[in-house]
Amino acid sequence: MQNEILDTPTLYALAEQAMQQYDLQYQGKIKLLCQSENATFVIQTPNTKYALRLHRPNYHSKKAIQSELLWLDALTEHGISVPQAITNKDDEYVLTLKYSSKIERHAVLFNWVQGEMPTTDVDPKAFKQLGSITAQLHQHSKQWQRPDHFNRIIWDHDTMVSSEGHWGHWADVKNLTQLDRTLLQETVHTIGTQLKQLDKSPQYYGLIHADLRLTNLLLQDNKIGVIDFDDCGLSWFMHDLAAALSFNEHLPHAPEWVDQWLNGYEQHAHISQLEYALIPSFIMQRRIQMLAWTGSHADTEMTKSLGNHWIKETTRLCKQYLKHDDVMPLGAA
């Protein structure tokens, strides 16, 4: 399992163990904010607050987490509002916590990024802001010289939608009929064939956020903050557009969201004709990646809330894509 499976008392014990390693100015009330892939705590001090992230097991190595923090440092220097890690008393950014001989977790303390989180219920123009900030991240990624020891997760066709997928395999999802499986397999094959047109040259492929949805934007005044770089890794830049729609590709406003995202992106960067032509394949690839995620996270509230309707909508989008792979697989029936 990659999502956090420890009970709440154990998570609090680990959080307290972590905070003991920081200076007095960072000490405060510890409160669990959310428990999903990772466990995130709010540390409320008399003057401010911080975010403590306890990493899920069996996902990122310490070196990989340190690499994420290097990119966050570089983005901050570039003027983009992202979380900044804080060192402990021993000048370490990434802590290794041991609760028992079998339970070990990495932890990082971040400053708190202020702002309100938009949702899909807001004006679709929020996606224009999302596209705009994504383009700025991509521009930075293309010009930033990554250190030699930099190591992050790879997001390609195999690691997203094959049996070797980082988030599991879509074929393991319960309630899929044999017809569903045949349809999904054909869709995965078609996506793979289409994406072979796009190589991994720096023009198309590089370091991306990989989960840049509205839930990871924070809006305050005219500033946009970006959070949760836990899945950042190497992939095609247009995967970030597909990720922006995660779980919601079948909703009525999805086509308008994509238009707004593209408008915002083009204000700062250009999408090549080839990339644009392959956007439908990226969208469908992400949808099936998230289907795989629901299979490996079947007991989570998120998966339960989606229900069988979401699977039926996924297969409907597959049919739409296979019929016209140059048309966006988006929107309601």
Image: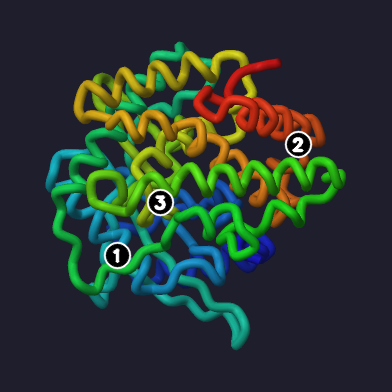
Decide which of tag 2 and tag 1 comes sooner along the chain.
1
Q: What residue is pinned by disc 3?
A: 51
Residue depth check, mark 3 versus mark 2: number of the one nearer the observer? 2
Report, in whole angstroms, how far the alpha carbon at label 1 lies from the one at label 3. Answer: 19 Å
User: Which part of the image, by quadrant, shows the N terminus?
Assistant: bottom right
Element at badge 1?
helix
Q: What residue is pinned by disc 1?
A: 67
Three-letter code for the amino acid on which mark 2 is drawn:
Ile
Residue 288: percent from left, percent from top: 62, 43
Q: What residue is pinned by disc 2?
A: 311
Question: Around disc 1, counting alpha carbons within 10 Å, would you say few (fewer than 14), some (14 to 19), or many (20 or more)?
Answer: many
Report, in whole angstroms, how far the alpha carbon at label 2 lies from the one at label 1. Answer: 35 Å
Q: What is the count of numbered marks?
A: 3
Q: Nearer the viewer, residue 35 or 187?
A: 187
Query: Residue visible at 46% across and 19% down?
Result: 257
Question: Around disc 3, counting alpha carbons within 10 Å, would you say few (fewer than 14), some (14 to 19), or many (20 or more)?
Answer: many
Residue 270: percent from left, percent from top: 23, 29
Residue extending farthest to the bottom is 101
Element at badge 2?
helix
Three-letter code for the amino acid on which mark 1 is drawn:
Ser
Query: Residue visible at 39% across and 14% down?
Result: 125
Three-letter code for the amino acid on which mark 3 is drawn:
Ala
